[in-house]
Image: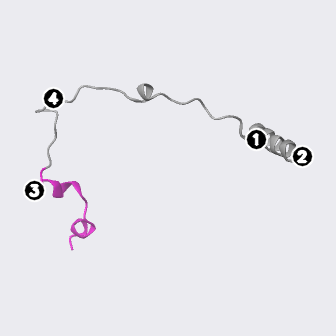
Amino acid sequence: MANDSATDAAAAARLARFGKLPERVRFQEMVEEKKAAPSGAEIVSYNAEGSWNHFSCLALDLGL
């Protein structure tokens, strides 16, 4: 019986220190549905030949 009171005291100390866990979030509350973006003008494609000018090169900046 002494072990039960020690276990109860430890549980009470844990509850006082950490409190209780938050309520579970339902899956329906975590999911948001949106329409897909239309194909065409809103999609930006990758241009390999034009991508070099988006990066800076110190050697080119210094003229080396």
Q: Is residue 11 above or below residue 34?
A: below
Q: Choose top left, top right, bottom left or bottom right for residue 10.
A: top right
Image side of residue 27 versus residue 45, left or right: right
Residue 1 or residue 61, whichever sits in front: 1
What residue is pinned by disc 3? 49
- Between marks 2 and 3 in the image, the one whose residue lies nearer the viewer: 2
Residue projecting furthest to the bottom: 64
What residue is pinned by disc 1? 17
Q: Position of residue 3 (x, y in %)?
A: 85, 47
Q: Position of residue 63 (x, y in %)?
A: 21, 70
Q: Position of residue 53 (x, y in %)?
A: 18, 56
Residues at marks 4 and 2, CA–CA distance in whole angstroms: 69 Å
Mark found first going from the N terminus, 1 or 2: 2
Numbered range of the magenta stretch = 47-64
Q: Is residue 31 above or below residue 55?
A: above
Mark found first going from the N terminus, 4 or 3: 4
Does the magenta segment cover residue 51? yes
Name the amino acid type tagged 3: Glu
Q: Which numbered tag is attached to residue 2?
A: 2
Mark found first going from the N terminus, 4 or 1: 1
Residue 39 or residue 41, whichever sits in front: 39
Mark found first going from the N terminus, 1 or 3: 1
Name the amino acid type tagged 4: Pro
Q: Which numbered tag is attached to residue 38?
A: 4
- Contact check, label 1 and label 3, Cβ < 8 Å: no
- Contact check, label 4 and label 2, Cβ < 8 Å: no
Tell me which residue sits at (76%, 41%) in the image.
17
